[in-house]
Image (cartoon, grey):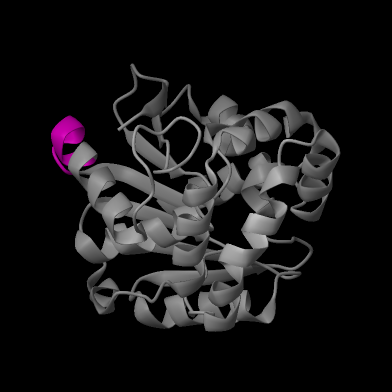
Amino acid sequence: MVVKEFGINNKEIIVLLHGGGLSWWNYTDEIKLLQDKFHIIIPALDGHSDSDLDFTSIEDNAARIIKYIDEKFNGKVLLISGLSLGGQILLEILSQRNDICKFAIIESALAIPMPITQSLIKPSIKLSYGLIHKKWFSKLQMKSLKIRSDLFDNYYRDTCIITIDNYIRFMKSNSSYRVNPNLSLCQAKVLIFVGGRERPVMKRSAKLIRSIIPNSKMISVKEYHHGELSINHADKYVQYITTLMK
């Protein structure tokens, strides 16, 4: 597994799981705010720009991250956070290993399958994939995703690297993921974030996750779109982390 590491001399381990189609730079500002106190690990999700494996499933990716934590950190870290696809992988990690971390942050994670959306993914990606290498198209995508403009070079570079097959696989997995019943055994203290301007299915997903994880709290950030909290508001995101760990 390929990872980015920051603050490597610090004792406490934080694992950050980026969103689908993104990379480590999803948390670029959080890194600046946290690396003096924490050892930060950001794995490249399977099938993404820096990864050493194609994407197969959310469950497989979760198992690989657990194996990495087992081998490098004796199976325990302080906190794991995940955005969108990374949030779904985190849900699966917490289901497969309920005591792997003390704290967790789940941001904008879809937990309700969307079969109609899933059926449209393959044809829509095949139609649009050729446009990914066009900068004007990437800028439109960034704008729709509410990603701030200074991250464009990173976004454009990394989205161009992802193969069409990996796009199809992880987006289909994203739209079909169903929460593992073992999530109810999670021992971590968990914050669940959803943007107030996200789709209704995302808000229902956050409520579902909240109902399953025993020691959890849901926060709706009213003015934000999907993933906007960690990508564009690192100061507030880190403040939530600090409060959670107190």
Q: Name the one closer to the observer, 165 or 90.
A: 165
User: Horizontal and vertical percent for residue 75?
Assistant: 16, 43
Is residue 30 something that shows in the picture? no
* Relative vertical location of residue 102 with respect to residue 23 in this rendering, above or below: below
Is 73 part of what is drawn in magenta? yes
Residue drawn 57% across and 37% down? 27
Does the image show residue 213? Answer: yes
Residue drawn at (71%, 53%) of the image: 128
Picture quadrant of residue 189? bottom left
**Quadrant in which the N terminus appears:** top left
Q: Residue at x 52, y 82 (%)?
A: 115
Left or right position of 198 against 85: right
Q: Position of residue 16 (x, y in %)?
A: 44, 42
Q: Does 116 sit above or below residue 21?
A: below
Instruction: Indicate left or right for 175 with 63 as reference.
Output: right
Looking at the picture, tell me which residue is in the foreground, 168 or 237.
Answer: 168
Could you say which is closer to the camera, residue 22 or residue 78?
22
Give the image quarter of residue 72.
Answer: top left
Residue 59 percent coordinates (x, y): 29, 60
Q: Which range of residues does the magenta coloring cover?
A: 69-75
Relative to 68, residue 7 above or below:
above
Residue 241, placed above or below residue 136: below
Measured from the top left, where is residue 32 in percent x and y?
A: 58, 25
Q: How many marks?
A: 0
Is residue 140 highlighted in magenta? Answer: no
Q: Which residue is outermost to the top?
A: 9
Question: Residue at horizontal 20%, vertical 57%?
Answer: 99
Q: Main secondary structure of the magenta part?
A: helix
